[in-house]
Amino acid sequence: MARAKIALIGAGMIGGTLAHVAAREALGDVILFDIAEGTPQGKALDIAEATAVFGSDVSLKGANDYADIAGADVCIVTAGVPRKPGMSRDDLIGINLKVMKAVGEGIKAHAPDAFVICITNPLDAMVWALQKFSGLPKEKVVGMAGVLDSARFAYFLAEKTGVSVQDIHAWTLGGHGDDMVPMVRHSTIGGLPLPDAVAAGLLSQGDLDAIVDRTRKGGGEIVALLKTGSAFYAPAESAIAMAKSYLLDQKRVLPCAVWLSGEYGLSDLYVGVPALLGAGGVEKVIEFTTNDDEKAMFKKSVESVQGLIQACKDIDASLA
Ligand code: A3D
């Protein structure tokens, strides 16, 4: 059977890391696309040379022409600009919306059957615009944010409690902004929902509150430390988990920004919810039960996403 073809649109910090991980895991042949000349070719050659060390038969190629992504099974989009210290994700909207238009048209023309994972910020609005510009089926276009935000939540819980990250299942829902919703009742340590973990003395309520706050601001913490850009290792790993669930039909339930049509009482927008990813793309949206507090937090986060979508419509009339 032919190897899968994975097109990475954007060969910057996340794109290069995606190429490295995809090659190491022998997930498929990799096309690294960017408008910058030399960068995708240089990174592809560097990683291709590394395949002789880690022993993977996949091929890697850098490209500046969308024709090279032809027939891709998966496209992972990181094209655009990241945040610098002092910027919010929303400050990126003007530049990155134009990038989504070019990328959407490129994917539509050359890889219309692909499963598309968007990472470009502000995530929930950019994946919405990318679906519109590409015209691909909504179940084949998803955004990566929740896997990363939930991984941060899980890591902070593991660090505080000393329990293996493997035995912590954390969930964040809503938009990928500072008002995302870490789902305390639905997240577990060794099977114990977090309120029970507090009652059992695994961590204090104060620790949990601080972790929820740190999770919400997790992206900004890395931006402040790096000073030149935003996180890339954990975002790349998160998108690879989503790509694998699609390519290998694993049917994992992962928090992703997906198109909602009635679920959670919402329609016509992308927002982060648990979704089953398999060979059909988004095969099912899982609806968590929510109490009044969670509903109020989710509503606030959704309103932020709706505001960003409106801003996209104001910038580009073709989206209205
Ligand atoms: P960076 O290293 O700057 O890479 C972006 C790449 O996009 C550069 O190589 C550019 O040359 C390229 N590019 C710009 N315009 C185009 C275009 N029109 N077509 C093709 N390529 C283009 O950034 P990065 O890899 O660190 O981050 C990429 C994006 O991901 C940014 O928007 C970040 O804000 C976002 N991001 C999202 C998350 C989420 O969890 C959603 C996390 C971290 C970063």
Image: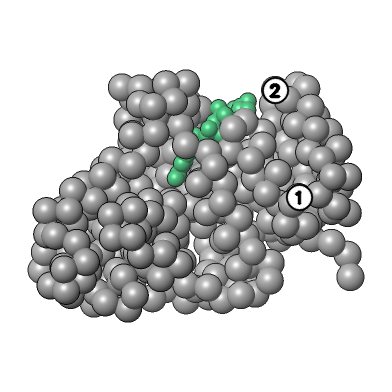
Q: Is mark 2 within 8 Å of ligand 1?
A: yes
Q: Is residue 287 above or below residue 72?
A: below
Cα–Cα span, label 2 and label 1? 22 Å
Q: Quadrant of residue 5?
A: bottom right
User: Where residue 156 sits in the image (x, y, percent)?
Assistant: 32, 52
Q: Amino acid at mark 1?
A: Ala
The N terminus - image quarter? bottom right
Q: How many marks?
A: 2
| Label ID, residue 206 | none
In front of the other: 197 or 77: 197
The residue beneath circle 2 is 36
Residue at 72% x, 57% y is 25
Q: Is residue 154 above or below residue 30?
A: below
Quarter for ligand 1?
top right
Residue at 65% x, 74% y is 249
User: Where residue 39 sits in the image (x, y, percent)?
Assistant: 73, 25
The residue beneath circle 1 is 23
